[in-house]
Image: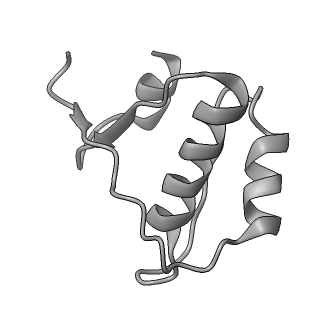
Amino acid sequence: MSSDLAPLPSPARAWSAVERTRVLDQLSAAADARVVTLTATAGFGKSTVLAQWSERWRIERAGEVVWLEVTDGADSREVADR
């Protein structure tokens, strides 16, 4: 794997977290898109909602989800092309 991408373990599901149904539905609707971005400032629950969505994905589609960290200085267009 290239040095600008690093695999990460899936975050643990926070069972006490509020399920953000609208955001989860929007992510599911965009599932066939090549790239989907989810942006918000720190502390707004991006990782939590993505963990919830990845669990939903595994159940509904029996699909695999891979978490990657893109390092600073990586060319985002090149990463998306992979």
Q: Residue at x 23, y 44 (%)?
A: 71
Q: Residue at x 25, y 42 (%)?
A: 9
In the depicted structure, whether residue 29 falls above or below residue 33: below
Q: Residue at x 43, y 23 (%)?
A: 78
Q: Report the coloring of the rendering.
A: one colour
Residue, far left: 3
Q: Quadrant of residue 74?
A: top left
Relative horizontal placement of residue 43, taking residue 36 as reference (left or right): left
Quadrant location of the N terminus? top left
Q: Position of residue 24 (x, y in %)?
A: 73, 57
Q: Quadrant of residue 73?
A: top left
Q: Residue at x 42, y 61 (%)?
A: 13
In the depicted structure, whether residue 26 falls above or below residue 74: below
Relative horizontal placement of residue 25, taking residue 9 as reference (left or right): right
Return the residue nearer the eye: 37 or 24: 24
Return the residue nearer the eye: 41 or 31: 31
Relative horizontal placement of residue 22, taking residue 66 as reference (left or right): right
Q: Position of residue 29 (x, y in %)?
A: 85, 42
In the depicted structure, whether residue 30 falls above or below residue 77: below
Q: Quadrant of residue 67?
A: top left
